[in-house]
């Protein structure tokens, strides 16, 4: 009987390290410290969502239909997964726009310069 790999310690909840691999065919055993992929840290529910998302080829409307959930829920689940994988969900564009507006408010740039920056010129 096989069990799914757990990634967190059931006692202290810290990340576990894989230290032993074994081939059930030839009985070879390899011991070292092995790294799991980032996807291995996702919950079963998150992995099921990722699988559905991939089968739907990233089409959010299809994911909505397949799972019977709303667009904001799909986006929220995607953001949770992105965060779980260690990435920032804040769009670079949003940050840049806020900085440009602040610079404009402080008088550091002119309205014309702000427009050019927002257009990416």
Image (spheres, rainbow, N blue to C red):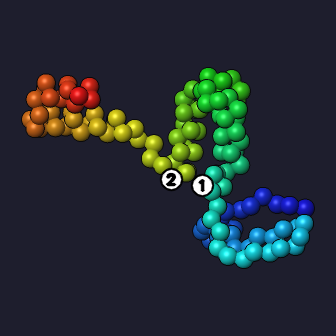
Residue 55 showing in the rendered view? yes
Does residue 36 appear left or right of residue 113 in this picture? Answer: right
Mark 1 = which residue?
38
Residue 10 % position (x, y): 69, 68
Q: CA distance from mark 2 to mark 1?
A: 8 Å
Residues at discs 2 and 1 in contact (Cβ within 8 Å): yes
Look at the image and tell me in which quarter the C terminus lies: top left
Does residue 79 appear left or right of residue 116 in this picture? Answer: right
Does residue 83 appear left or right of residue 38 in this picture? Answer: left
- Please tell me which residue is depicted at 41% across the width and 41% down the height of the picture: 90
Look at the image and tell me in which quarter the N terminus lies: bottom right
Residue 111 placement: quadrant: top left
Picture layout, residue 18 above or below residue 54: below
Picture layout, residue 31 above or below residue 73: below
Residue 117 % position (x, y): 22, 30
Mark 2 = which residue?
86
């Amino acid at each position: 009987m096989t069990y799914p790999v757990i990634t967190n310690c059931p006692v202290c909840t810290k990340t576990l390290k894989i230290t032993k691999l074994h081939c059930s065919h030839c009985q070879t055993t390899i011991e070292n410290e092995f790294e799991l992929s980032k996807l291995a840290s996702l919950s079963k529910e998150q992995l099921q969502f990722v699988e559905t998302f991939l089968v739907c080829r990233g089409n959010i409307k299809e994911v909505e239909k397949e799972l019977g959930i709303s667009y904001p829920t799909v986006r929220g689940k995607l953001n949770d997964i992105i965060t779980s994988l260690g990435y920032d969900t804040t769009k670079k564009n949003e940050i840049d726009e806020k900085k440009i507006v602040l610079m404009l408010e402080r008088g550091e740039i002119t309205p014309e310069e702000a427009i050019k920056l927002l257009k990416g010129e």
